[in-house]
Image (cartoon, coloured by chain):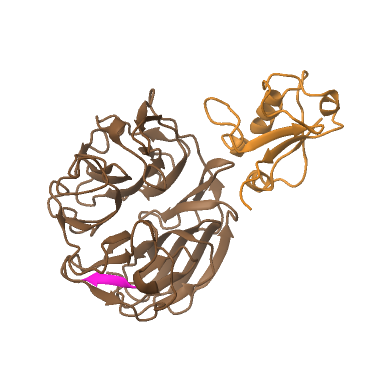
Amino acid sequence: MAANGSRVRVLVGTRKGAFVLESDGKRKHWDITGPHFGGWEIYHIKGSPVDPNRIYASQTSGWFGQIVQRSDDGGKTWEAVGNEFAYNGVPGTHQWYDGTAHPWEFKRVWHMEPSLTDAETVYAGVEDAALFKSVDGGKTWSELSGLREHGSGSKWQPGAGGMGLHTILLDRLNPERIFIAISAAGAFRSEDGGKTWKPINKGLLSQYIPDPDAEVGHCVHRIAMHPARPQTLFMQKHWDVMRTDDAGDHWHEVSGNLPTDFGFVIDVHAHEPETVYVVPIKSDSEHYPPDGQLRVYRSRCGGNEWEALANGLPQEHCYVNVLRDAMAVDSLDRCGVYFGTTGGQVYASADSGDSWEAIARDLPGVLSVEVQTLP
Amino acid sequence: MIRVVIPAHLRTLAGVDGELRLEVDAPVTPRRILDALEAGYPVLRGAIREHGTRKRRPWLRFFACEEDFSHQSPDEPLPDPVAQGLEPFFVVGAIAGG
């Protein structure tokens, strides 16, 4: 655990730039800098756990393509590094929305995941779905093509936002193990550092694919893990909140008493591996909270029993969404929880979700939120 | 010297202001201008032309002398006023949105 004398840095990616919010351990007063890369979409921005001053950002544009930015001073200054993401070999086809074959094409980086042990090593999850790795601080990128080529790639299909690899979970206890998730293909696991992969979707049921319990094709929105319990994963699927206790070999539903089990984000308390957070969204066609009330739901028992957390959140006329990469936790003694909305608000709770306040209110639509707990 | 105008976001990315002036050997073509641009400002690699194929990114256009050169061969010589530095070669972002 980190003492409350620590500092917290919140890294926010938005539709029109990146913002860095900093506070002391009390998390009452926040200094905001930005926009960095104003006018560009910042899909994700995340710091290295090895060197917190090393931060990677995915900067994208429909006009100008993909840029990867790197900071070595905690986000004060930035340097554009390598942006060439070339698939290995001839990438072939995946399914288009109507089931026809569609050629694989790189579009953007959805998620940057810095290594747990080396600041120069970072993984990138991209659209069209593939996993890339850099071992030179983002200057060059190589595809871990065993994922795309493991056998089911031709059956993957894009979700509404594209066919993005959006979740990368590294296992602190087993450096060779990596989990990833793709919309709409599902979850996959590697036991050899990313060389070979297997789908881990047993137990998922999706009515929007021809075979609801197929091996792949599920629209997984997000997976979360507590670092001390890497066998246990929590998943927010398109519909359904799921849990596995055997590293994805079997999943079971833990939606329980949620008002709706559609949503995007899911995260786990920094010190309580059975405390889980989601933000229920009304439906896949409405993409806003039920009844115009923005509520985080917390389970303290690993799912099924959920309590609404509304103190400090708008409880009328609220029709924002919370996107899949837009929730994070800090590791202070009283775990802080943070999330951003498509309406440009960043909400923070310094008491594990009991109460909330907006620490930024009028940013561009938020795509991602990450938190660094600093000494 | 060849005059080149690039969109504001790319000027910010390259750390430059205003119009660029580049040495380009004759015959002056879109490919030679873009090769010189990327050699001088490597951060622009991939931002105007795709890596690998070197194809123009679909939301960008190439204009000069009030004509559209987006769809001609990148090896086709540009008009004399561009080669003589009298008129700029424009890289323009397509209008998208309201």
Residue range corresponding to the magenta coloring: A294-299
Residue A131 in percent (x, y) is at 35, 39
* Residue depicted at 77% across the width and 23% down the height: B78
| B93 or A25: nearer the viewer | B93
Secondary structure character of the magenta stretch overall:
strand
Tell me, yes or no, whether the highlighted magenta stretch contains residue A5. no
| B8 or B60: nearer the viewer | B60
Residue A79 in percent (x, y) is at 55, 47
Relative to residue A364, is residue A111 drawn left or right?
A: left
Q: Is residue A223 visible?
A: no
Relative to residue A208, is residue A113 drawn left or right?
A: right
The hue of chain B in the figure is orange
Residue A106 in percent (x, y) is at 45, 35
The hue of chain A in the figure is brown
* Residue depicted at 34% across the width and 67% down the height: A330
* Residue depicted at 42% across the width and 77% down the height: A314
Quarter occupied by residue B50 = top right
| Image position of A290 with respect to A92: above or below | below
Tell me, yes or no, whether the highlighted magenta stretch contains residue A295. yes
| Image position of A175 with respect to A303: above or below | above
